[in-house]
Amino acid sequence: MSELLDPFGRRIEYVRLSVTDRCDLRCEYCMPKGFKDFHEPEEWLRFDEIERVIAAFARLGVSRVRLTGGEPLVRRDIHLLAGRLARLPGIDDLSLSTNATRLEKQAKLLHHAGIKRINVSLDTLHADRFKHLTGGKLEKVIAGLMAAKSTGFMPIKLNMVVMRGVNDDEIEDMVEFCIEHDFTLRFIEIMPMGASGRAATDRYLNLQTVRERLAKRYKLIEGMMPGGGPARYVQVAGTELRIGFITPISQHFCQTCNRVRLAVDGTLYLCLGQEDRIELRPLLRNGIDDEGLEATLLDAISRKPERHEFREKPQKVLRFMSMTGG
């Protein structure tokens, strides 16, 4: 079997799969308020097309798939797609990133389909601040989290984008919330993705300072978590809480990159912070066979760039985060 090795010797084993570019929230660093320039549904990959691509990746050694968006739970019948992907030979880790606004009603269906762990974006525990940052209702997210917890998802990871002067006063509160509910916490540095992301970079906060701040209140020991992502973890001594730091700006993790992103329109992005891409939808709809599809994926990975340039060239990536997949 051919392996998905990029030019720098990194084995690609993880696909982040965007099933929609639409979202029911408007987090200002992800998608501008009032944005309506979405792909039309006929441009979205159909479930059978998605299954073909992921099956080809699996035959080449990919074992992890994460469903993302936009907000993946706005895609109709997403649990049916999850079930199809979970049954593919070679896929042994199917996970979900969500804002959890629709999770209360869908948690059991998704868990039964084969999704066992989830990441939830949550930047604040204050309802009024949540409304200001996202346009949504915090109580829906909390209800979704509690439904996921009672359903049996494990682990449940909360992703908090820490922004100077916006929510950095809630860091310890989020730690205590996660200790209380047995959630994992990940802090993320804001990234200059698209105009909205760049506009928010004046609120950038180096997560090294966050770790130092937490170390003054908690005893932090080195920790580990299963998963294919880039977080570096510590554990709060005396608790089960693990805290991850995702630092694309202050300490990039490109040397261990093991992932690519498949957008809802069939664009395969080889790097979050570069514009290198392969358009798969035309190939799928023009009748490419499985052998040709695998050859296309192998060729794409052979051109994966070494690293992003968020710090050096923050104007480089024009697409919004919601267009790429989280």
Image (cartoon, helix red, strand yellow):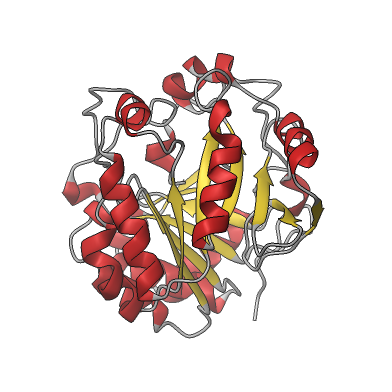
x%, y% of residue 203? Answer: 56, 18
- x, y percentage for residue 3? 67, 72
Q: Is residue 69 left or right of residue 47?
A: right
Residue 274, visible in the rendered structure: no
Q: Looking at the picture, how far across and down is residue 12, in whole percent?
A: 64, 62
Residue in the image at 67% along x and 35% along y? 308
User: Which image quarter is the N terminus in?
Assistant: bottom right
Placement of 55 over or under 12, stated as above or below: below
Q: Answer with left or right where residue 184 lies relative to residue 44.
A: right
Q: Residue at x 32, y 65 (%)?
A: 147
Residue 144 visible (yes or no): yes
- Above or below, 155 against 133 in this view is below
Corner quadrant of residue 170: top right
Q: Is residue 182 above or below residue 21?
A: below
Q: What is the tally of numbered marks visible in this picture?
A: 0
Q: Nearer the viewer, residue 314 or 159?
A: 159
Q: Position of residue 159 (x, y in %)?
A: 52, 46
192 to the left or right of 145: right
Q: Which residue sits at x=53%, y=35%?
A: 161
Residue ID at (40%, 73%): 115
Residue 174's place in the image compared with 105, above or below, is above
